[in-house]
Image: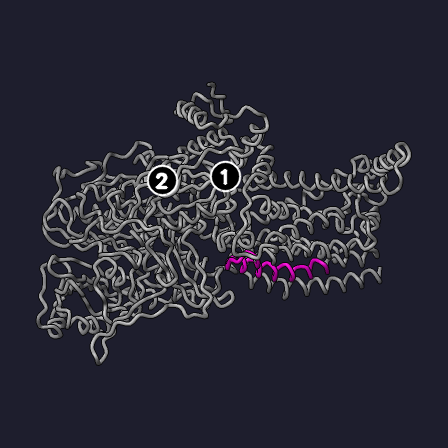
């Protein structure tokens, strides 16, 4: 079936590196019985949802500084409309996890994730959040936050450049645009 | 100058005479129409203000601000609105559920009621009481109840600290705001807003009122600013201290109400300052310069009003993004020891000036 | 030195001495308390600065290494060691009543080794949860012994502490609650608007006034010291950048210097100059960020964005020469990993006048603002004696009048070849700590100017063996971090991996000083004081 071209302003469809991922995603959604958007109202709703994403910053270590750089004047994520960072999880849409997650912090992260209002997304930034990073041999570090919460986008790097984080944000926007709002896909169950 | 009475009387004529509605139904239709227009204007102006704040803030900080969503980022607040309408509303288990659901309504209703009493242009004045100023002050205090209820019913230590701070701050600054508005009432001799504006035909009160009016303008801007929980007075929602203050536990459209009300309160404070001190929709007239006055009259009154409000709003944004915030004891000290005595003395001064000149 | 040696021998005749640059004495645990009392209180010696307290597992015995300095005579330093053979229930005397910084250090040793300290006021684990089994830095620790639990921490878990007191009946262990029942205790953190990291403070309030603060660490404890024991020396360098990531270059420099000192390796002058310049650039970047975050804590986000904008220029310089923005990865053991980029000097020469102009703008925007002055002045005083006792080094200590700049006391790299002033202030309030950072940026610009004109030609790296093995012994190196005295202690048994690595964290002492400074102030001041101390949590937690 056809993937309708998801349009992100100022970046061409061909410049994204993983368009095959989108096509596979659409196939899976179809297999689960979810319809890909064709209606205009869904289009408008998804346009609104993907362009107004309010992040909850969860910065534990070094990647937190690159998070500050993304918000600062040179690489400005306010251009995408993402600068309204709410400090209360109930008002945020996406949770950025910057930095390493350790055993002591894990219940706090899970609690924050549970407090967020639906629909919610998670972006894991930095190799520590993806897989434990340089600290994977430690006794106190969790090897990736996807052991605790479901993750939507992974941004690798140690620390990733602010431009890479912006690319990850645009991938998140594409993913939001693809989901049908009234029948969101099942969240994977974490054992 | 174009008088909006032409439009409103045309609609009245249409309903009453041409379509032959009985009195009750005419009035009912007109009320509903007014309500719809006010709510629509409220929402649209709020969206515009959200966009303006984000862009102005960005320019102060040498950044660009929203520019991807629509040309120059103009559709950004629309996207925000769509998103907020669709968020899940979480209801807290161990909170006082009734008060928790009621609190945002106090805030938004207080704000809309104040908004509807403003004179937007000649003939475009929805509620024109003879106690106009008194009504504005009274109704804008409804918001305080909403904030206190929100903090109390959330069952959250931080929210309560935020609400207590906010309550103390709002109640204190009400006094200075009221006293500075009273100065203008003394000067103009009436509380009715349309009469106050008519009284500024020969020059705005900030010029004709002399020094006391100017001082009252400054104190009103400061006190009104503090009333809206913005700028150097935003301790109750001090982001770097108490996470999010009194609206920590709200999500979805209930939070949207607080968000909207904050921007609209800023607009309302600027609008009241414009009406009382800068002439409202009255163009700039200099007594004796007839040619100049005629040119000024060509510009429609609604543009005058929004232009002046825009200047006051820009001042508010400028102050908010330049200054750090005051601590709670400094804030209260500033009000009770500095601002209120100045307002009291100023009121006396104005009374003396009015009797003498 | 001999004077001290005789004194120690007179108090503890069984003490043994080791061959080392600094006088190192191994003292039996029963005499240890007298020796430390004497060293602290004696009029001639006055060892009032406890620089580091390092727990050790020597195989059969468990023990502690103390590094003591005297602030009145900077050449006076001594290293004491003590140990106990009891591995089941090790106990040593506490020195937390003599030096306040020992309070947290001893809790760390208890956490990692299990040594309980007698007469410590509130013993409990520092980084790990209280139900953690085992002591991680012991050599016989099983790395898989603790699995992830998602249970939330209970109030009891966070508030129970024990003390081991020596009474007439012998040693008595009693537990108590840190906060009373009627106290209004609030949690600040760990997830807080991300300025300083994940610090959890439990604050007992009386209205808006702070009565007591209990900091909780460990939310970013990555176990770096244990990991270093399994890595080779070049691999350790990768981890050092990530401790206090804002002074990453300086931390890396410290470890390189320590290993090079141990190998007795000569570093070419060119490498020394460039390393110094990078250090100073990092210092400027760190102070800019510290300034910006402090202003953001006060509510002025504009100042933060301005600080970050100027920091981006420094990041450009790092990226061009080193390859990384935050983690420059440039110094290696022996020198630099590659030569400097041709544009390096040109960019630095352009940056210096630009930064001077911007500093004037910052002063106009923020320092002279009456609201900002009202928030900062008259708040948060730390006296000089408190600073020394708590071990508060760096700009915060210098703002209280303690002259503790390691670049002046033990010059390393190219610091002995240049002229610069050590900025000192006397009051020790929040405003002084704020101003001293901006003044230090100016001094760093002067240092850069002097160095940029005189980089010698030559090699940028000395030859080292493919596998680096340090000789047996203990090696130490101190460096002036952006936050204070950063120390690296490497204990080697001749292998290609170290036996024990300890990083002396300047931020831990800064965070421990929060309690005495903030008692009696308001919550809003607590945030300001935290901002002015400018600690970075991963440096505390390692």
> Which of the pair B68/C133 is nearer the observer?
C133
Q: Secondary structure at mark 2?
A: helix
| Residue identifier under label 1 | A119
Q: Which residues are magenta?
A: B152-179
| Residue identifier under label 2 | A146
Task: Reply yes or no: does residue B170 show up in magenta.
Answer: yes
Q: Is residue A30 left or right of residue B95?
A: left
Name above or below for residue B142 compared with residue B82.
Answer: below
Spot occupied by residue C50 in the image (x, y as percentages of width and height): 25, 64
Spot occupied by residue A88 in the image (x, y as percentages of width and height): 50, 49
- Picture quadrant of residue C457: top left
Write down the chain letter for disc 1: A
Q: Is residue C422 visible?
A: no
Callout 2: 10 Å neighbours few (<14), some, many (20+)?
some
Spot occupied by residue A73 in the image (x, y as percentages of width and height): 47, 39
Q: Could you tell me what secondary structure mostly forms the magenta stretch?
A: helix
Spot occupied by residue B228 in the image (x, y as percentages of width and height): 63, 52
């Amino acid at each position: 079936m056809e993937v309708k071209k998801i349009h992100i302003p100022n970046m061409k469809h061909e410049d994204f590196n993983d368009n095959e991922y989108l096509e596979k995603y659409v196939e899976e959604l179809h297999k689960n019985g979810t319809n890909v958007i064709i209606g205009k109202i869904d289009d408008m709703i998804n346009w609104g949802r993907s362009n107004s994403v309010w992040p909850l910053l969860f910065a534990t270590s070094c990647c937190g500084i690159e998070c500050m750089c993304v918000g600062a004047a040179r690489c400005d994520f306010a251009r995408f409309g993402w600068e309204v960072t709410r400090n209360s999880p109930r008002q945020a849409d996406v949770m950025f996890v910057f930095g390493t997650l350790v055993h002591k912090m894990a219940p706090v992260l899970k609690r924050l994730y549970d407090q967020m209002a639906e629909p919610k997304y998670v972006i894991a930034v930095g190799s520590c959040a993806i897989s434990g990073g340089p600290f994977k041999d430690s006794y106190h570090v969790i090897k990736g936050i996807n052991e605790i919460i479901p993750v939507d986008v992974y941004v690798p790097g140690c620390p990733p450049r602010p431009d890479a984080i912006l690319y990850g944000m645009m991938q998140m926007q594409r993913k939001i645009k693809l989901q049908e709002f009234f029948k969101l896909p099942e969240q994977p169950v974490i054992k | 100058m174009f008088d909006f009475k032409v439009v409103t009387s045309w609609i009245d004529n249409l309903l009453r005479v041409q379509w032959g509605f009985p009195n009750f139904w005419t009035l009912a239709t007109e009320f509903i129409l007014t309500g719809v227009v006010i709510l629509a204007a409220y929402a649209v102006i709020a969206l515009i203000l959200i966009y303006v704040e984000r862009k102005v803030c960005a320019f102060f900080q040498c950044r660009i601000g929203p520019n991807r969503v629509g040309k120059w980022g103009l559709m950004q607040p629309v996207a925000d609105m769509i998103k907020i309408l669709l968020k899940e509303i979480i209801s807290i288990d161990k909170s006082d559920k009734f008060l928790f659901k009621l609190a945002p309504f106090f805030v938004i209703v207080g704000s809309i009621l104040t908004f509807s009493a403003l004179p937007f242009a000649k003939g475009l004045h929805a509620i024109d009481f003879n106690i106009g100023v008194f009504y504005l002050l009274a109704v804008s205090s409804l918001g305080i109840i909403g904030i206190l209820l929100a903090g109390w019913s959330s069952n959250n230590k931080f929210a309560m600290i935020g609400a207590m701070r906010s309550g103390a701050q709002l109640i204190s600054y009400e006094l200075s705001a009221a006293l500075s508005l009273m100065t203008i009432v003394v000067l103009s001799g009436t509380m009715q807003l349309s009469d106050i504006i008519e009284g500024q035909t020969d020059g705005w009160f900030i010029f004709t009122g002399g020094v006391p009016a100017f001082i009252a303008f400054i104190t009103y801007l400061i006190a009104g600013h503090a009333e809206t929980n913005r700028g150097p007075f935003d301790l109750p929602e001090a982001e770097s201290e108490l996470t999010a203050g009194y609206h920590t536990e709200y999500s979805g459209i209930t939070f949207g109400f607080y968000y909207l009300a904050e921007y609209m309160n800023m607009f309302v404070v600027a609008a009241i300052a414009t009406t009382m001190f800068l002439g409202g929709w009255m163009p700039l007239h200099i007594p004796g310069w007839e040619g100049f006055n005629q040119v000024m009259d060509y510009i429609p009154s609604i543009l005058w009003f929004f232009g002046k409000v825009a200047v006051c709003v820009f001042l508010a944004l400028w102050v908010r993004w330049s200054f750090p915030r005051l601590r709670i004891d400094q804030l209260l000290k500033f009000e009770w020891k500095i601002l209120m005595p100045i307002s009291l003395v100023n009121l006396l001064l104005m009374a003396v000036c009015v009797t003498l000149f | 030195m001999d004077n001290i040696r005789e004194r120690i021998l007179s108090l503890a005749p069984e003490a043994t001495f080791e061959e080392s640059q600094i006088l190192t004495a191994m003292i039996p645990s029963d005499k240890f308390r007298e020796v430390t009392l004497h060293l602290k209180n004696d009029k001639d010696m006055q060892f009032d600065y406890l620089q580091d307290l390092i727990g050790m597992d020597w195989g059969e015995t468990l023990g502690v290494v103390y590094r003591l300095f005297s602030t009145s005579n900077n050449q006076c330093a001594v290293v004491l060691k003590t140990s106990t053979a009891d591995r089941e229930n090790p106990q040593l005397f506490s020195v937390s009543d003599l030096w306040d910084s020992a309070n947290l250090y001893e809790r760390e040793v208890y956490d990692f080794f299990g040594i309980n300290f007698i007469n410590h006021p509130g013993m409990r684990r520092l980084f790990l949860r209280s139900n953690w089994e085992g002591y991680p830095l012991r050599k016989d620790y099983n790395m898989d012994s603790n699995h992830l639990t998602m249970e939330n921490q209970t109030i009891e878990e966070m508030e129970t502490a024990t003390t081991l007191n020596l009474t007439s009946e012998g040693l008595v262990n009693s537990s108590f609650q840190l906060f009373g029942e009627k106290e209004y205790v609030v949690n600040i953190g760990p997830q807080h608007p991300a300025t300083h990291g994940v610090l959890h403070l439990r604050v007992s309030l009386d209205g808006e006034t702070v009565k007591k603060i209990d900091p909780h660490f460990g939310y970013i404890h990555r176990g770096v010291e244990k990991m270093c024991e399994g890595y080779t020396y070049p691999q350790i360098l990768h981890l050092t950048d990530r401790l206090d990531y804002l002074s990453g270059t300086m931390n890396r420099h410290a470890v390189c210097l320590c290993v090079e000192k141990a190998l007795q390796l000569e570093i070419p002058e060119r490498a020394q100059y460039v390393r110094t310049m990078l250090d100073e650039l990092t210092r400027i970047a760190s102070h800019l960020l510290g300034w910006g975050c402090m202003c953001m804590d006060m509510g002025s986000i504009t100042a933060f964005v301005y600080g970050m904008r100027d920091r981006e220029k420094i990041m450009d310089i790092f990226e061009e020469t080193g390859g990384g923005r935050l983690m420059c990865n440039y110094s290696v053991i022996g020198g630099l990993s590659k030569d400097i980029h041709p544009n390096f000097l040109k960019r630095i020469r352009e940056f210096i006048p630009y930064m001077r102009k911007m500093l004037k703008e910052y002063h106009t925007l923020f320092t002279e603002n009456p609201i900002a002055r009202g928030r900062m002045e008259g708040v948060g005083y730390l006296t000089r004696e408190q600073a020394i006792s708590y071990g508060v080094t760096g700009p915060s200590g210098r703002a209280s009048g303690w002259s503790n700049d390691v670049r002046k006391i033990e010059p390393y790299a190219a610091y002995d070849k240049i002229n610069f002033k050590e900025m000192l202030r006397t009051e020790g309030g929040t405003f002084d700590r704020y101003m001293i950072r901006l003044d230090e940026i100016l001094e760093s610009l002067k240092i850069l100017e002097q160095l940029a004109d005189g980089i010698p030609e030559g090699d940028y790296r000395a030859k080292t063996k493919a596998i680096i093995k340090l000789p047996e012994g203990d090696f130490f190196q101190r460096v002036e971090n952006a936050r204070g005295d950063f120390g690296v202690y490497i204990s080697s048994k001749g292998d290609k991996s170290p036996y024990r690595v300890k990083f002396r964290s300047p931020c831990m002492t800064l965070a421990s000083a929060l309690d005495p400074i903030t008692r009696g102030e308001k919550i809003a001041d607590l945030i300001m004081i935290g901002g002015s101390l400018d600690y970075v949590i991963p440096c505390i937690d390692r």
